Image (cartoon, rainbow, N blue to C red):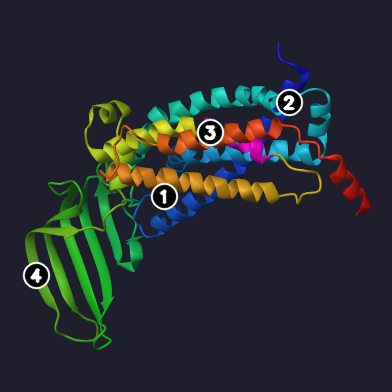
């Protein structure tokens, strides 16, 4: 049976944790939306995938946001209790500092299990799904925003494109017309380029990295507007390179998308570093909770956010050390067996030492010192 004070403190911690998580998610989602909208405007990704990509990237971002959110949640909840002298009432009732660990564990244990699930399975699956959506979108003209029977402006004002008909999956089309204009920086003239084709298809190169339009039985007209030196060329087959899509296949996203079973069997330093990073997420949640408890202790006369600023500085140092260790492991400068324990064990030890010190009563001053203090 939970004590009344445990239920009260657990409720305060949960509310503060959810509030901190919501604020951090709003900041992160805002940055993600701005980045995706910029890529949509440049034609890098289709607009239909905006909501799906936001959700998938949010799942991946939880591995960083959740430990920070619970760290700030403990600071906010217990810091308020100290400022409003509720902790003094608890202490007078016989509740020691270590007695506050019980409601913390009610939040920490389920959260660690959830973060382990997200870190080892859900986040990599979200990255893989994001890559699959973008890769599938790059293979279809329909998903890219091209509609049969309508003139469509190409990204970056590269021209206008029109197709009369298209198959169901958007990979083949009939009767295409492309017109584009380019300004010449040397003389200020404008070059006109018109391409037509009876039919064609969208395909990728052998590596699957770049997209091309394969055009059959068409004409190509090139010239400068206002001059009569146009060149007409008839072709049987013509291939045009399209603007690269955002496939989300950077080296960082590739290693984050690898299944955990593959990382366990790998000897590559980069993948071993990724495995240690996934293991560090739930452990960091517990370490930061232990560190937040003594850092939240304050007196009612202290500034409202003084301890919170100190806590944020401590988190920045801890996170920087973990990031540095990840870089060292991936570069082969540190053994993967050492992992991030060289950061987590000292941090947890410091937190436990601070908890022990916070329970010690101040030593009584000698009588002479008390008399001198009264005289002053």
Which one is earlier in the sequence, the residue at label 2 or at label 3? 2
Closer mark to the observer between disc 4 and disc 3: 3
Which one is earlier in the sequence, the residue at label 4 or at label 3? 4
Estimate the spatial distance between the alpha carbons at disc 2 and disc 4, rounded to whole Å.
88 Å
267, above or below 173, in the image: above
Q: Which residues are magenta?
A: 286-296
Dot label at residue 349: 3
**Residue shown at 43%/58% (left/top)?**
38
* Residue 325 appears in the rendering: yes
Estimate the spatial distance between the alpha carbons at disc 2 and disc 3, rounded to whole Å.
19 Å
Image quarter of the N terminus: top right
Residue labelled with disc 2: 96
278, above or below 105, in the image: below
Residue 208 in magenta stretch:
no
For mark 3, give the secondary structure: helix
Are the residues at dot 4 and dot 1 in contact (C-beta closer than 8 Å)? no
Estimate the spatial distance between the alpha carbons at disc 1 and disc 3, rounded to whole Å.
49 Å
Estimate the spatial distance between the alpha carbons at disc 4 and disc 1, rounded to whole Å.
36 Å
Residue labelled with disc 4: 233
Residue labelled with disc 1: 47
Which one is earlier in the sequence, the residue at label 2 or at label 4? 2
**Residue shown at 93%/52% (left/top)?**
375
């Amino acid at each position: 049976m939970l004590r009344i004070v445990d239920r009260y403190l657990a409720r305060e911690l949960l509310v503060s944790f959810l509030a901190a998580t919501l604020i951090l998610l709003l900041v992160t989602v805002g940055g993600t939306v701005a980045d995706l909208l910029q890529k949509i405007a440049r034609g890098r990704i289709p607009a239909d995938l905006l909501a799906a990509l936001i959700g998938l990237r949010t799942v991946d971002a939880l591995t960083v946001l959740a430990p920070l959110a619970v760290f700030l949640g403990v600071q906010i909840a217990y810091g308020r209790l100290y400022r409003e002298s509720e902790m003094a009432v608890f202490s007078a009732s016989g509740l020691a500092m270590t007695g506050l660990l019980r409601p913390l564990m009610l939040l920490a244990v389920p959260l660690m299990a959830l973060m382990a699930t997200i870190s080892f399975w859900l986040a990599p699956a979200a990255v893989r799904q994001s890559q699959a959506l973008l890769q599938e979108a790059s293979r279809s003209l329909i998903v890219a925003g091209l509609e049969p029977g309508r003139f469509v402006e190409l990204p970056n004002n590269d021209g206008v494109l029109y197709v009369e008909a298209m198959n169901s999956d958007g990979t083949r089309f009939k009767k295409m017309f492309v017109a584009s204009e380019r300004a010449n920086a040397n003389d200020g003239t404008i070059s006109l380029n018109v391409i037509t084709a009876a039919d064609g298809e969208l395909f990728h190169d052998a590596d699957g990295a770049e997209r091309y339009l394969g055009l059959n039985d068409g004409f190509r007209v090139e010239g400068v507007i206002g001059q009569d030196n146009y060149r007409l060329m008839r072709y049987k087959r013509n291939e045009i390179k399209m603007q690269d899509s955002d496939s989300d296949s950077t080296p960082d996203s590739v290693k984050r998308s690898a299944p955990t079973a593959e990382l366990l069997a790998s000897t590559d330093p980069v993948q071993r570093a990724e495995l240690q990073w996934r293991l560090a997420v739930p452990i960091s949640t517990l370490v930061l909770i232990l560190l937040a408890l003594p850092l939240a202790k304050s007196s009612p006369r202290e500034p409202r956010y003084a301890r919170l600023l100190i806590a944020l500085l401590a988190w920045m140092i801890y996170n920087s050390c973990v990031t540095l260790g990840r870089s060292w492991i991936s570069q082969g400068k540190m053994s993967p067996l050492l992992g991030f324990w060289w950061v987590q064990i000292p941090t947890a030890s410091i937190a436990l030492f601070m908890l022990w010190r916070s329970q010690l009563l101040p030593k009584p001053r000698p009588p002479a010192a008390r008399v001198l203090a009264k005289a002053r």
